[in-house]
Amino acid sequence: MDTGDRLLTPGEVAALFRVDPKTVTRWAAAGRIGSIRTPGGHRRFRESEVRQLLEGEGALEELNKDLPPEPNGGNGGSGGYHPPSLN
């Protein structure tokens, strides 16, 4: 890992993709996006990998492909969720 690579929270990744943070966690659990765990057990995502995914054609569709539906019936879209903006 590049020691200068910033680690993003699920909320920060969600803001970039305009999805709910739980969707980002589901992607990680399904192996769609790499993550590391902090000593406290929280997921973090390498900014370089996230940016690379964002630049890819059809990235969001590929991340959501064949994922089981969310327990609350969500679709992984923006359905009323408005993530905070990144600085």
Image (cartoon, rainbow, N blue to C red):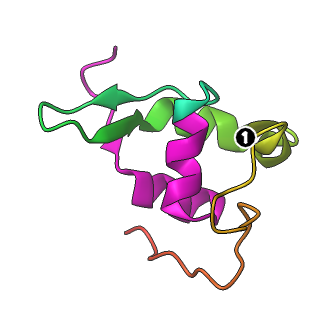
Residue at x 20% of width, y 33% of height? 38
**Viewer-proximal residue among 67 and 62:** 67
Residue situated furthest bottom in the rendering: 80
Return the x and y of residue 65 as percentages of the image width and height.
Answer: 84, 38
Which SS class for mark 1?
helix
- Above or below — where is 76 with respect to 85? above
Which residue is tagged 1?
Answer: 55
Q: Position of residue 55 (x, y in %)?
A: 72, 40
Quadrant placement of the N terminus: top left
Tell me the magenta residue range. 1-28
Number of residue marks: 1
- Where, by quadrant of the figure, is residue 67 drawn? top right
Quadrant of the image occupied by residue 57: top right
Residue at 70 percent of width and 74 percent of height: 78
Magenta stretch encompasses residue 18: yes
- Disc 1 residue type? Glu
Q: Position of residue 16 (x, y in %)?
A: 57, 59
Query: Is residue 72 found left or right of 69 in the rendered image?
Result: left
Instruction: Name the residue at 50% across, 25% down.
Output: 34
Residue 56 in sight: no
Determine the residue located farthest toward the top in the rendered image.
Answer: 1
Quadrant of the frame with the C terminus: bottom left
Q: Residue at the spot x=87%, y=43% of the render? A: 58
User: Label 1 crowding class (10 Å Cα cut-off): few <14, some 14-19, many 20+?
Assistant: few
- Horizontally, is 39 left or right of 44 in the view? left
Question: What x and y, as percent, mark residue 14?
Answer: 53, 59
On screen, residue 28 above or below 9: above
Residue 48 magenta-drawn? no
Q: Is 23 on the left-hand or right-hand side of 35?
A: right
- Residue 8 visible at all: yes
**Residue at the front extreme, as displayed:** 71
